[in-house]
Amino acid sequence: MLTFIVAFLITYALFSISGVLFPTDPSYYASLKKPSYNPPAKLFGIAWGILYALISASVAIVYTKTDGFQEAAASYVLILLINFLANQACTFFEFKLKNLRLAFLDTAFVSISTFLLINATIPYSKLAAWLLVPYLLWSCVATVLAWSVYLLNKSSNRAF
């Protein structure tokens, strides 16, 4: 149980790090044109907090079932790493570079890599795979939203 808790906390901290390194810029985000179906800005932090907990639980399950990833396929670890890096890059592209096109492309890549991660997780735990489904759904919604924000702001110098 201690291994699960430590793996959970480390994963949660790692996935949360982009919020510290590349904090959102509320005035910039408020200045963007957004579609009518855009959720309230406060919902994003709540949603990601919940999603990071689900991701962390999934990773901790696989970590404990594979003796600290020693028995995990290299493909699982690679997909997890790629998904993590893509997830972190999104806030960098959107709020540090203010490049909406790269943010959209990255968000789409997060969705694809999440789908691959779910499939790579199934052999270790169906529960761990199911815990990632909300992440996939949110990433798909975020991709559509990022595309819409990009299109709405394409004519401005913010969209690149």
Image (cartoon, rainbow, N blue to C red):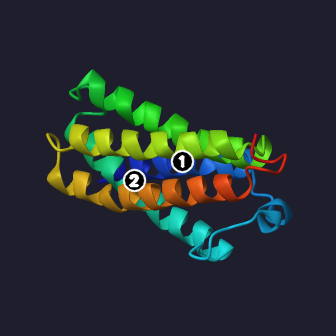
On screen, 88 above or below 27?
Answer: above
Mark 1 and mark 2 lie on one chain; the one further toward the N terminus is 1
Q: How many numbered marks are there? A: 2
The disc label shown at residue 15, or none: 1
Badge 1 marks a residue whose secondary structure is helix
131 or 13: nearer the viewer: 131
Q: Quadrant of the C terminus?
A: top right
On screen, 31 above or below 120?
Answer: below
Q: Left or right? Give the position of 88 relative to 73.
A: right
Cα separation, mark 1 vs mark 2, equals 9 Å
User: Circle 2 sits on which residue?
Assistant: 55
Quadrant in the picture for residue 37: bottom right
Q: Is residue 64 visible?
A: no
Q: Residues within 10 Å of mark 1 (few under 14, many from 20)?
A: many
Residue depicted at 14% across the width and 40% down the height: 123
Q: Is residue 17 visible?
A: yes
Q: Left or right? Give the position of 143 relative to 33.
A: left
Q: Quadrant of the N terminus?
A: bottom left
Residue depicted at 28% across the width and 22% down the height: 74
Q: Left or right? Give the position of 140 relative to 123.
A: right
The disc label shown at residue 29, or none: none
Quadrant in the picture for residue 30: bottom right
Q: Position of residue 18 (x, y in %)?
A: 65, 46
Residue depicted at 31% across the width and 41% down the height: 117
Q: Position of residue 55 (x, y in %)?
A: 39, 53
45 or 159: nearer the viewer: 159
Callout 1 touching callout 2 (CB < 8 Å): yes
113 or 150: nearer the viewer: 150
Q: Left or right? Give the position of 145 relative to 52.
A: right
Mark 2: which amino acid? Ile
Q: Residues within 10 Å of mark 2 (few under 14, many from 20)?
A: many
